[in-house]
Image: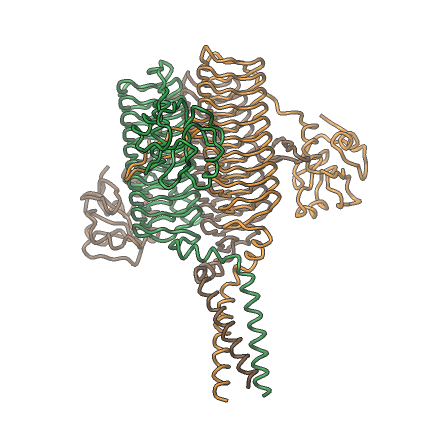
Chain colours: A green, B brown, C orange
Amino acid sequence: MEFSLEEIARRVGGEVRGDNRVRIRGVAPINSAAKGDITFISNPKYVKALKTTEASAVIVPPGISDDSKNLIVSENSYLAFARTIEMVYGPKARPSCGVSGEARIHASAKIGRGVNVFPGVFIEQGVSIGDGCDLYPGVYVGKGSAIGSDCRLFPNVAIMDGCMIGSRVLIHAGAVIGSDGFGFAREGQVQHKIQQIGNVVVEDDVEIGSNCCIDRAVLGSTVIGRGTKMDNLIQIGHNVVIGPNCTIVAQVGVSGSTKIGSNTVIAGQVGITGHIEIGDNVEIGAKSGVINSIPSNEKYLGIPAAPISTARKTYALFYDLPEMRRELSRLRRELDALRKELEEK
Amino acid sequence: MEFSLEEIARRVGGEVRGDNRVRIRGVAPINSAAKGDITFISNPKYVKALKTTEASAVIVPPGISDDSKNLIVSENSYLAFARTIEMVYGPKARPSCGVSGEARIHASAKIGRGVNVFPGVFIEQGVSIGDGCDLYPGVYVGKGSAIGSDCRLFPNVAIMDGCMIGSRVLIHAGAVIGSDGFGFAREGQVQHKIQQIGNVVVEDDVEIGSNCCIDRAVLGSTVIGRGTKMDNLIQIGHNVVIGPNCTIVAQVGVSGSTKIGSNTVIAGQVGITGHIEIGDNVEIGAKSGVINSIPSNEKYLGIPAAPISTARKTYALFYDLPEMRRELSRLRRELDALRKELEEK
Amino acid sequence: MEFSLEEIARRVGGEVRGDNRVRIRGVAPINSAAKGDITFISNPKYVKALKTTEASAVIVPPGISDDSKNLIVSENSYLAFARTIEMVYGPKARPSCGVSGEARIHASAKIGRGVNVFPGVFIEQGVSIGDGCDLYPGVYVGKGSAIGSDCRLFPNVAIMDGCMIGSRVLIHAGAVIGSDGFGFAREGQVQHKIQQIGNVVVEDDVEIGSNCCIDRAVLGSTVIGRGTKMDNLIQIGHNVVIGPNCTIVAQVGVSGSTKIGSNTVIAGQVGITGHIEIGDNVEIGAKSGVINSIPSNEKYLGIPAAPISTARKTYALFYDLPEMRRELSRLRRELDALRKELEEK
C-alpha cells in the first residue's frame, strides 16, 4: 500500500514538518531505509542517523527537528510507528487451512467458527476453542482446557489439562502452560511429589513468548492478568498471580505464590522470590534479585533489589572498593603515626 | 471422596485439635477455602490468614494453635498436606489411549505392557519403553534409548539417541535430553565441533521440568541421580554428574564436568562453573555464581558464592557503601586537619 | 576402527612420546578409560589423573610429561582430541528415511537432494530446503523460509516464516527461530503490539542450542553471523546483529538492537542491554550484566560489567566489606579520641 505523508500523520496521530505530499511505500530501519520508506527514531542514540538516512520521512518525538527531512512529530511516537507499520503492511495474514483432517481432535471438543487447526495438532477431551483461533502444528491442548476467541498458538505450544486461556491471547512456539508446579515434601532422603491439582488462567490480550513455562497451581490458579506481555524463556512458578498490563522481559523467573500488581515492568533476567507481593506500577531493573515485597509505584534495582536511587549510587562506586580499601590502609598508617608522634611529645 | 478429619489425621500422620468428626471434601488455598475444605499453612506469613479462612480444618506444623479452628498438627506438615491431596483427589488419572496406530514406532522397538503412546510420537530403532509409560504427542525417542517403567514423557519431549532413562521418571513438556554438549576446538577463527559421543543417564524417580536441557557427554555419561527433582528451564552441561535426591530450582545452569553430591539444594538462577565439585547436603542461595568447589554440608550464597554467613553480612551492608565512602572522606579531612594542628603546635 | 598411536598422531597433529605402535580402539574419559582407549587432558585439574588412568595413551598440551605413559603432545591438544574422536568413531551417522510421505510439505516447497524429512515435519508454502538436510520429527518451517544445504534441524525446532538459514547449520531440539520480537507501544494502560515484520538470518556454519529463542526483527533482520556457536536456552532479541565466530554460552540474553562483533566469547547467564555495541574479540565473564558498549579486544566481568582487572580486584575483596566497616568504626573512635587528647593538652 502507498500513502502520502499527510494521510499517515492523520491516521497514526502526528503533525507533518516538511513535504506532506511525499509518498510512502514501506517502513525500514533508519540505516537501511531508502527513498519511499518512512523510518523512526525511538532512542536518542539514533538522532545522528537522522542526518544520513535516505528515508523519505521520519517519525520523531517532540523536540527533535531537522529542516532537511520530512518529519512526523508525534507525542507518542512509538505508537505512531506501530500504527504506521499496520497501515503500510496491514495486519498479519492468518493461515487458511481450516480444521485439518490430520489433526487429532477428541469428539467431545468444541471448535468455534473460522478456526485453523493444522495437521499434527492434538486436542483432548472436553476442550473448547473459540472462534477465529489458529493452532499451529505440534500444539497440544489437554483435557478440559478452554481457549477463547482469536488466539494464536504457535508451533509446539503445550497447554496442559484444565487451563483457561482468554481471548486474543498469543502464545509463541514451544511455550508450556500448566505443567506441574515444583512442589515436594521432604521426608529424610525422599522427596514426595505434591500433586498439583490447580490450573493456569491466562486472561484476555496476554502475549506469552517462546519457550516460556507457566506452572499450574498446587491448589487454585496461577494467573496471568489481562493485557500482560511476556517475552521469551520466562519461568512463572505455581500460584503466582500477575495483574493486568504488566511487561515481563526475557528470562525472568518468579517463584511460587508471589503476587504482582498491574502495569508493573520487570526487566530481563530478574529473579523474584516466592510468597511476596510486588505492587502496581513498579519497575524492576534488569538482573535484579528481589527478596522482599515492593510497594506500588516504586523503582527497584540490584542484588538484593533496593530502591533505584540507593542501588544506582551504590553500583556507581562499587568498583571504587579497592581504592576505598587503600584509603583505609593509608588512614590507619597516618593515624597510628600521628598518635605515636603525639605520645612522643 | 469425603473423609472425617480423624481419618485424614490418622492416614497422613498428625493429631487433631478440635472436632475430629468434621467432614472434608476438598483441599483449597487458605484464602479461597470454603466449608468442607481442608487447607494448609506452609509459610509463617500466612498464620494471620488462619483467623479469616472459611476452611473446615487446617493442617499446621507444631507450635501453631488456634482454638477457634479445627487443626491437624503434624511434625512434617508439608508431607501431611501432600498426602491429604492424594487422599482426597486420588492419584493423577492416566490416559488410556494405548499404543496409537498414528504413532511412528520402529519395528525393532520394544514397548512394555500398559503403555500409552499418543499419535504423533516418534520412536526410533532399538528403543525400549518399559511397562506403564505414557508418551504424549510430539515426544521423540532417538535410536537405542531405553526408558524404564512408569515414566511420563509429556508433550514434545525429545530424548536423543542412546540415552538411558530410569523408572518412574517424569519429564515435562519441551524438555530436551541428550542434545549435543557445547564443545568446540578453536583453530584461529574457526571453531571445530567436537563430536559428542557420550549419552545422558537419568536414574529412577527423577523429575525434570519443562523446557530443561540436559546435554549428552562428550565421552561417557551426563548423569542425573536417583530421586533428584529439577524445575523448569534448567541447563545441565555435558559430563555433569548430579547425585541422588538433589533439588534444583528453575533457570539454574551447571557447566560441563561439574560434579554435585546428594541431597544438595540449588535455588533459582544459580550458575555453577565447570570442572568443580559440590558436596552432599549443600545449599546454594538463589542467583549465586559458584566458581569454586564447595565441601559437603555447607551453605553458600552470593556472586561469587561464599559461606552464607559471610555473604549475608556483606550483602546486608552493601547499600551502606555510599555512606562508608562519605565517612572515609570525613576521616581523611579530619585527620589532615588534626595533623596540621599538631604540626602548628 | 583401530589405529596405531603413530597414525593418530600423524593425522590429528601431534608428536608421540612413548610407544608409537600401541593400538587404539576407543576414546574415553580419563577416569574410566581402559586398555585400548586414548584419553585427553584439557584442564590442569586433571593432570594428577594421568598417574592413575588405565588409558593406553593420553593427548596432552606441551609442558605435560610422564615417562610411564604413552603421550601425544600437541600444540592444539583440544583440536587433536576433536580429530581423534572423528578418526576413531567416524562422522555422526545421518538418518536415511528420505522424504517421508507422512511429513506435510506444501506443493510449492523445494526440497533438495539427499534430504531426510521425518514424519510429523510441517513445511509451508514457498519454503526451500537445500541438499543433504535432515529435518527431524516435529520440525516446523514457516512460509517462505529458506534453508541451505547440509543443515540438521532436530526435533520440534520451529523456523517461523520468512527466515533465512545458511548451510551446515545445526539447530538443536526445541529452538525457535523467528518468533515475534518483544515490542509494544504503551498508551496509558494499554500495550499495542508492534507488528514484527522483519526476519532472522542465520549464516553458514552456525550451531544453535536446544530451546534457544531468536526473535525476528521489527524491521530488517536479526542476524547470527557465520560460524557463531550458541549453547542452550539463549535469548536473542529483535534486531540483534551478532558477527562471525562468536561463542555464546547457555542462558545468555541479548536485548534488542545490540550489535556484537566477531570472535567474541560470552559466558553463561550474561545479560546484555539493548542498543549497545560489543566489539570483536571481546570476552565477557559469566553472569555479567553489560549496560554499556565494550570496545574490541577487551575482557569484561561483573554486575555492572567492568574491565576484568578492575572487576577481579573488586570482587576479590567484596567479602571484606564487613571488616572494612569495622575498621572505619575503629578509625573513627581512635581519631575522635586523639582529637580529644590533643584538645586537652
Q: What residue sits 75% from the left and 43% below the top? A: C62
Kindly indicate the quadrant of the structure image that contains residue A127: top left
**Residue A261: x, y in percent?**
29, 45
What is the number of callouts on the image?
A: 0
C241 sits to left or right of C12: left
Please say whether residue A24 is visible from this viewpoint.
Answer: yes
Would you place residue B277 above or below residue C24 in this image? below
Nearer to us in this view, C306 or A199: C306
Is residue B114 visible to the viewer in this orientation of the structure? no
**Residue drawn at point x = 46 percent, y = 35 percent:** A50
Rendered residue at 51%/56% (across/down):
B298
A213 displayed left or right of C84 = left
Image spot of residue C144 (x, y percent): 46, 18
Image position, residue C200 (x, y; %): 49, 27
Furthest toward the top, the residue is C107
With B306 as the anchor, is C37 left or right in this view?
right
Q: Name the image quarter holding the C terminus of chain B.
A: bottom right
Between A71 and A322, the residue placed more toward the observer is: A71
Q: Nearer the viewer, residue C288 or C97?
A: C288
